[in-house]
Amino acid sequence: MIELEKLQSIIEELAPAKLGDKYDTPYFLRQPIKKIKKIGVCVDPTEYNLRIAIKDGVDLLLSHHPWHDQVEDILQKSQMGILVLHSSWNKAPEGNKATLARLLNLEEIIHEAEMVRGVTQMTLRDLLFCCQRVLKVPIIPYAGDLNANVNKVLIISGPGFAPIYKQQWDKYITQGCDTFLSSELGRYALSYLTRHKIKLIDLGHSVMARPGMEHLTYTLQTRLKDFECEVAFYPDLYAVNYQTASFYPGFES
């Protein structure tokens, strides 16, 4: 069992609030009880994850995303708290983007906000297979010649193929990045980036966060061992890309 205040200090150490976007620091969707015996970790607080976590007796659920469904009725008879980490864990030294870059065996890794770039020596086909293995998904959308060599890779956390990221695309194109990995690939990004000879892999908005949240689970299991506090991962996800290009109609014509 661990006091909530002590747990918050550990979470702050792992995912400092100062790293998060100013409008997106960690926050409680529901305040938990003061003494925590069991912690759940998930990418998305889906109805399935919430029901199973409540059934398992979870006191606090650490989620990457906030909920997008009407779930208040599920939580009415539960005291389970929910803490959303989002951009603070995305940008943390051991967070989502860092974990993904490490598992993809990128070298010369450089972190900048929600971006991480690194170097590799493989074909697009090999990188695609590596993404499938790491993310545990059989099908991943891509654009580009599978036999083409990949050298400089850019990973953008979240919906990095949304048109609002165009300024960042241009910046990293000029820096020599030849392959972009992100999510929410729509017509505008596909047309614009392929014209610039950029190879694209759409990892899925929630799917690309899963390795990092699994890593957080393992980290907390280690850190909280002396407290005899159980930590479990809940794997259910929202749809692969739930912020579709239709949110940006001005760019999609």
Image (spheres, rainbow, N blue to C red):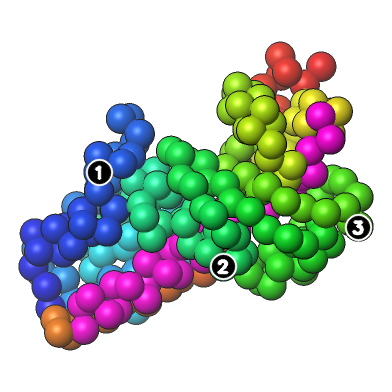
Residue shown at 84% from the left, 35% from the top: 197
Q: Position of residue 190 (x, y in %)?
A: 80, 34
Q: Disc 2 or 1, which lies upstream in sequence?
A: 1
Residue shown at 33% from the left, 60% from the top: 62
Kind of residue at badge 2: Leu
What span is colored magenta in the figure?
196-225
Of labels 2 and 1, the one closer to you: 2
Q: Position of residue 228 (x, y in %)?
A: 17, 85
* Residue 8 seen in render: yes
Q: Nearer the viewer, residue 67 or 15?
A: 15
Q: Which residue is mark 2?
A: 103
Q: Position of residue 129 (x, y in %)?
A: 77, 68
Q: Position of residue 174 (x, y in %)?
A: 67, 28
Residue 87's mark? Answer: none
Residue shown at 25% from the left, 43% from the top: 17
Residue shown at 73% from the left, 45% from the top: 179
Kind of residue at badge 1: Ala
Kind of residue at badge 3: Asn
The part of the image, by quadrant, that contains residue 27 is top left
Q: Disc 3 or 1, which lies upstream in sequence?
A: 1
Q: Please give left or right for residue 148 compared with residue 161 in the image.
A: right
Q: Are marks 3 and 2 in contact (CB under 8 Å)?
A: no
Where 126 falls versus 84 (above or below)? Answer: below
Q: Please give left or right for residue 212 compared with residue 126 in the image.
A: left
Where 57 falls versus 92 (above or below)? Answer: below
Q: Residues within 10 Å of mark 3 (few under 14, many from 20)?
A: few
Q: Which residue is mark 1?
A: 17
Residue 147's mark? Answer: 3
Q: Residues within 10 Å of mark 1 (few under 14, many from 20)?
A: many
Q: Please give left or right for residue 243 compared with residue 231 in the image.
A: right
